[in-house]
Amino acid sequence: MKTIKLCKLLGDAQTVVMLGMCKNAGKTTALCRLIAELNETDRAPLAITSIGRDGESTDLVTGTEKPPIYMFEGMLAATAKELLALSDVSREILMTTGLHTSLGEVVIFRARSDGFVQLAGPGIVEHLERLKEMFRSLGAGRVLVDGALSRRSPAAAARGGALVLSTGASLDRDMENVVAETAFAAEIMMLPQEHLPGKEMGRFTRFLPDGCSAGLETLQTLKRTAEEETVLVSGAFTEAQARSFLQSTVKKDGLTLLVRDAACLMLRRETYEALKRRGLRFALQQQVGLAAVTVNPVSAGGWSFPEEVFRERLQAVIPVPVLNVMREGDGDERTDI
Amino acid sequence: MSGLTFEQKEDLGFHVVRGWLEPASPYGIKRLRDEGFYGPDRQAELEQELDNIEVLLEAGKTENAALQSVQTVLGGLKEIRGTLDACAVRTLSEAEFFDLTAFCLRIESLREKLSRLKAFERLQGIVFKPLDGALAILHPEESGHVSFYIEDGRSPSLKEAREEKRLLELRLRTEKSERTALLAKRQEAVLKEEKALAEIYREMSEALIPYLADLRADAEAAGRLDASLAKATLAARCHCSRPRTGSNTLHLEEAVHPQIEAALKMHGRRFTPLTVDLPRGVSVITGANMGGKSVALKTIMLNTALALSGCFVFCKKAEIPAFARLELINRDLSDAERGLSSFGGEILRFGEAVSRLGEGLSFIAMDEFARGTNTEEGEAIARAAVSFLADQNAISLLTTHYDHTAELAARHYQVKGLKKLESLPAQDAPAGTQTDRLRVIEAAMDYGLIEVEPGTECPKDALTICRLLGMDERILAKLP
């Protein structure tokens, strides 16, 4: 099998966010792979943190053994005070950040040896932005962010950077469902980017081709007058909203729904597909560069998919490279180090 | 304790104005919060504080760059007092050692910056102890940057553990086989390293105990410096002046209420500064409705309270006696919460003020005392209060509408009032919006205070004000 280096797919993105579709999707394995690769290639020291907590050796949700994160001498890391003692890398503390988590203040350290680390970075995207500034002030290069748990909200953390999405057999017993859900997540992240046509006016703002705009209470009250128009959704577009709109008589063809970023589309695949079939288009104000999808064909529940079939099925519907990080690379069984 | 309640300070604008102080460090914030009221027993301390503000205010003009660099270092200080408390009883963690190291290095940098600030020599009561003893424990390598790391050489067992660990990590980087065994061996080295570090941390924590007092003293000094600097900065920005303390009379020249002044300015209006000289005994302010009597009272009380909390004042000149108590007797919204009418609240508060007269010189400010009841009895109560306060150990100030109250006062001020209106025909009610009407009143009103003979009849402007505010003609026609 041809070896693809994950790091080659990132371009010069200065922030890389790792997202998992579910637990045991191989996200941490992918992260460790990337750390090892970038530590070889990048000149400026790599910085790692998480948005939320991750990196514990036993998965707190499913109780399964998961690979810890292994970092290298010279790299920087940001984690909560209480997790410092649970990391076994030799640490030089460089900064206490004033950003707080339930496990204490986030602290930045430089690794003075190789070793394992437990990460719990800030839970808020704005705080992550501040943390990135601090990393830069300490001379860090790229920042790798372990997007813990939710596959949606950390997407916003990747603004202007790259995203690596991990998926796996743990998501569903039916491989076709895993493929469809993953393709859906990838599709949302790669929706076309559009600029805000005018000023935001409440929950929904309607923009007509002639430059007129107006605020709307709900999408159902929209009276279509133009062939093509755009409605801006402020905040999240939820499943409930999407369903009400789907059931309404409003003409969907020629309408574009614009949301801030992929994290704002909080609807189910079926609803999304149904709206799309009626001619509705979706667009993002801020796009995230999906760089790669990684797969783990083995589930925590005991079932697994034929690995090459699984990867190829995904590759057929996803326009970015799909990699099996459990196998690719150096061919070593343990790719977590 | 000043005697002012939280609600009264809120109402006076005291909290708003103190909130304009912008200390750079948590120590400055705490110092300002805990500074308290400078009563008669703390006058020397107050003088020292005002001296320091004056020195820093002057330094802001002559050596501003040096002062700014001091403020920048103060801004980088983090709160470590909790860590100091912890150090006395337990072993600190690496993050705590880092915070102490950063604090010591920043204080050292502050000391260096202060040595280049000429004004620093003249500051009183702000002394920074050198922290090289603590730094020798925390940061023996004297590297230029702020960080915390125990170098291998700190103990033989640490060196051994780290070397062992490093060799294994190097092998792990390249070797593909036997990884599990290598990781297990590394785990043993990790445990040795942790054990060696725990021992070093324990020794360090104990070694730091003799230096904790110096660290606390420096935190305190940083708080004092930061707070005084914040006060000097505000004084410079708002052109405040230094109050003279310990005087016999409460004397304010061209006093303004900065919060009200700012609000007026937003509407293109101006605050008329006030000048008063209040001796022991009772002074009375009378004047037209909407003439600013209550604002005058607030302005005088606010500036007095600011001076006695160690700030410069919003006056051209101020002389502030060493009051033991500040008493404000006004309509207080919290009365209703306590189940009192506004009249009941006033009477109770007045009673409290009277019962505390023995505690030292009081400043008692009463806004329209006893107006919440019928005129006849109300006036009798106000007269009795004035008559009683005349020979007490207090400087008292009343605003009132009652004609015969001022007769008993030692000093009587009147709002100049609607004098400019004499040339205008009074029945010409101006048309237009409420704002227009207020503007007419404001144009006609002179908010300045003049001293008059005690007992001079109060101006009767209420009817004119009604007309100017556009009261219905049908009602006005029914008036005598």
Image (cartoon, rainbow, N blue to C red):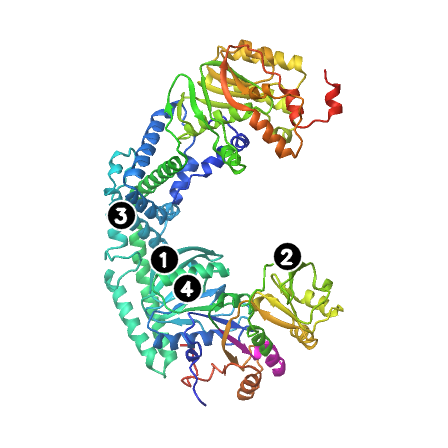
Say which residue label 1 marks. A95
Identify the element where label 1 is drawn.
strand
In front: label 3 or label 2: 2
- Give me the C-alpha separation between circle 2 and circle 1: 41 Å
**Image quadrant where residue B378 sits:** top right
**Image quadrant where residue B159 sits:** bottom left
Disc 4 crowd, CA 10 A, few/some/many (<14, 14-19, 20+): few
Number of labels in the image equals 4
Say which residue label 4 marks. A86
- What's under tag 4, amino acid-wise? Leu
Residue B108's mark? Answer: 3
Towards the viewer: B219 or B286: B286
Quadrant showing the C terminus of chain A: bottom left
What's the residue at 28%, 51% (across, down)? B105
- Give me the C-alpha separation between circle 1 and circle 3: 18 Å
**Image quadrant where residue A141 sits:** bottom left
Q: Position of residue B263 (x, y in %)?
A: 52, 36
In front: label 4 or label 3: 3
Quadrant showing the N terminus of chain A: bottom left
Say which residue label 2 marks. A202
Disc nearer the start of the sequence (2/1):
1
Query: Magenta span covers which residues?
Result: A163-181
- Residue B442 sits above or below residue A242 on the image: above
